[in-house]
Amino acid sequence: MHRLILIETSTALCSTALVEDGEVTARRESTSPRAHASMTAPFVEQMLSERGLKVRDCDAVCVSKGPGSYTGLRVGVSTAKGLCFGAGLPLLAVSSLEVLVAKAISTGKVPADCSAIIPVIDARRMEVYSAVFSPDGVQSGEIEPVVITEDSFREQRSKGRILLIGDGAAKCSEMLPDAAIEQTCPDAASMLAPALREFKGGHYENTAYFEPFYLKDFVATVSRKKLF
């Protein structure tokens, strides 16, 4: 029996799941703001305790590598690395956009006339992190930041209905009224299929040097609050 620990913290949802023999047997989730750092590791501990397991009883840790929230990704990857180093486990990583596509397919959200699944993670204002996938989940374009306009994804829309899925989907509805909208966050349980693919293929990351895929450089801002 193989066991995988799954960690997804790329958006506002802090999510973990435990996979045993190809099935999700435990999961934890929270949308509490700015709580990823305090919840991710305890969630993993709670799941393992629930199943009577230790980290060393697992075969690998899979983390969502982004794109997404800078802070959330740092927390997820740091937690995953700590688990891997502590128990001598290999590290796996999958795209947060791919997790959304897997979620659409596994939950039956893909319209019958769908020409493309387009995961969209909120990047502030009218910008999203996105890529184009076929209705059966094959990526056909690069991951990139996209400013949503009435002309966005015109090629895919000309061939049928597109599915926009992610925490940036709802804000696209006014500009793209012909699209199917699924406002949701990527979650650890939806990492099941891509994580198993990476595990079975032996596609392990270099734990020491692995970094999240931010897509954009982090820009620090100055607080407007007066300290003195």
Image (cartoon, rainbow, N blue to C red):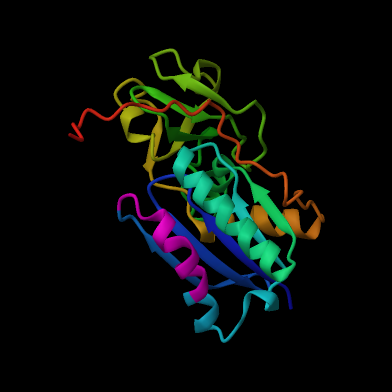
- At horizontal 51% and vertical 23% (from top left) the residue drawn is 145
- At horizontal 39% and vertical 42% (from top left) the residue drawn is 182
Task: Return the residue nearer the eye: 155 or 200.
Answer: 200
Residue 197 sits in quarter: bottom right
Tally the numbered discs.
Answer: 0
- Image check: 208 left or right of 103? right
Q: Which residues are magenta?
A: 33-45
Q: Percent position (x, y) of residue 50?
A: 50, 83
- At horizontal 44% and vertical 67% (from top left) the residue drawn is 28
Looking at this rendering, what residue extends furthest in the bottom direction? Answer: 52
Looking at this rendering, what residue extends furthest in the right direction? Answer: 202
Tell me if residue 77 comes above or below residue 154 in the rendering.
below
Task: Return the residue nearer the eye: 43 or 108.
Answer: 43
- Please state, as top left, top right, bottom left or bottom right, where the C terminus lies in the image: top left
Tell me if residue 53 comes above or below residue 72 in the rendering.
below
Question: Would you say residue 51 is visible in this rendering?
Answer: yes
Q: Percent position (x, y) of residue 64?
A: 58, 49
Q: Percent position (x, y) of residue 9?
A: 48, 51
Tell me if residue 124 comes above or below residue 206 in the rendering.
above
- Please state, as top left, top right, bottom left or bottom right, where the N terminus lies in the image: bottom right
For the stretch drawn in magenta, what is the main secondary structure? helix
Residue 35 part of the magenta segment: yes
- Image check: 163 left or right of 138? left
